Image (cartoon, grey):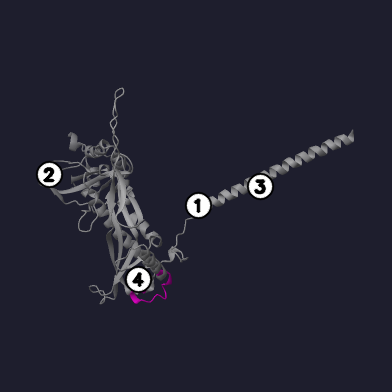
Amino acid sequence: MLDEIKRLLEEQKSLLLMKFDDRVQEAIKTVEGLEARIAEMEKLATPRRVHLAGLEDEKEKFSFFKAIWAIKTQNWDNAGFEKEIFENTRKRAMSMGTGSAGGFIVPTIYIAELIELLRADAIVAALGATFLTDLQGSPVQIPRQSAGATGYWVGENAAITASDLTLEQLSLTPKKVAALVKLSNSLIKLSNPAAEALIRRDIASTIALQIDLKALRGTGSASQPTGIASTASINTLEVSDPDGGTLDWDDLLDMEYKLAEDNALKGKLGYAIHPSLRRKLLKQKVAQFSGDTGGSYIVAPLTESLFQTWLGYPYKMTTQIPINLTKGAGTALTEVYFGNWEELIIGQWGGMEIALSTETSDAFEKDQTWVRVLQEVDIAVRHPESFCLVNDAASS
């Protein structure tokens, strides 16, 4: 009897050990699976480093100052990395059948920081404009729907009238925007990182201001892109006829309604205005519209958060919007832009081209090098009905 009990206990012990071992193995597999998933997640989370063929150096090592001094002196001893970038870029451009204007091209991946600075300074980027980078060839065609299918009610056994979607192409062709920087030769030779960061900031700001200006007001002529104000068939609203006048909150609601009428009140909606218009809207008082002798402000208290609430949408300000427009006898008028900014397309071709001169104007006398940084860009509105423009609002 005792032996039987011992046998049964041994069997139970073996079963328990087997089950425990199975659970240990399952736990090991689970841990291994989790480790594999963590490794995969880390791989995805790690920024991908892109290199030109044959280059293993990190993109952060590219120095504008080293490149400029080497181009100037034709001595690349201290700019080997920059030389490899330029040579590989030139080879790639030749193989693709494209050329440059004679300068040295810095690929986008090596000026990523500068591109980010550029976007940070452009109000159209902050409002949600769509940037298409590293475009190749010209023109670049972007499809857009210009007409949709039509629905009908039909009777019994009656034929359904056919209708087709109509697609057309939005064409982008490269146009050159440039920044000109005058540098002391002593500063370039020092290759000071802080000074180089300052120059990068200046270049980015200069190009961003030009992109902003032309995105809003480009005429489409004289090598300019076509901006929102010059785009055919956008919505427009007159504050007052014939001389312009004070833009009030009703006008802003009417601008919003213009988009709603066209089923375009969606996406990244917002306003672009001159700072004077913000001041004028904040200073509006109830007395202006109701005869209230107390002179209470419409937006009260005068806080940024409440102003944003009244607007109902984000806004950005730029002094590049004019405040000296005229209409009839009206002067000191300004523009107001409202729209879905992701429908504003900004195309960028390749990297930036560096060219320099020591003989322009008085550069030689002052021991300077004048550096021109050039970027190829084009701008277009994908659907004109996504924007509304007022151009007769009083600015003061």
- Measured Cα–Cα span from mark 3 to mark 2: 80 Å
Q: Which mark is residue 68?
A: 4
Would you name the residue on which mark 1 appears?
44
Where on the picture, by quarter, is residue 107?
Answer: bottom left
Q: Is residue 78 magenta?
A: yes
Q: Is residue 48 left or right of residue 248?
A: right
Using a 10 Å C-alpha cutoff, classify the residue at mark 2 as few (fewer than 14 neighbours), some (14 to 19) or many (20 or more).
Answer: some
Q: Nearer the viewer, residue 259 or 249?
A: 259
Q: Nearer the viewer, mark 2 or mark 1?
A: 1
Give coordinates of residue 151: x percent, y percent: 29, 31
Q: Nearer the viewer, mark 4 or mark 1?
A: 1
Q: Nearer the viewer, residue 74 or 365?
A: 74
Q: Residue furthest top?
A: 156
Q: Secondary structure at mark 1?
A: helix
Give coordinates of residue 318: x percent, y percent: 26, 52
Would you name the residue on which mark 2 appears?
243
| Earlier sequence position, callout 3 versus callout 2 | 3
What amino acid does circle 4 point to?
Ile
| Earlier sequence position, callout 4 versus callout 1 | 1
| Earlier sequence position, callout 2 versus callout 1 | 1
- Measured Cα–Cα span from mark 4 to mark 1: 36 Å
Q: Is mark 3 in CB contact (under 8 Å) with mark 2?
A: no
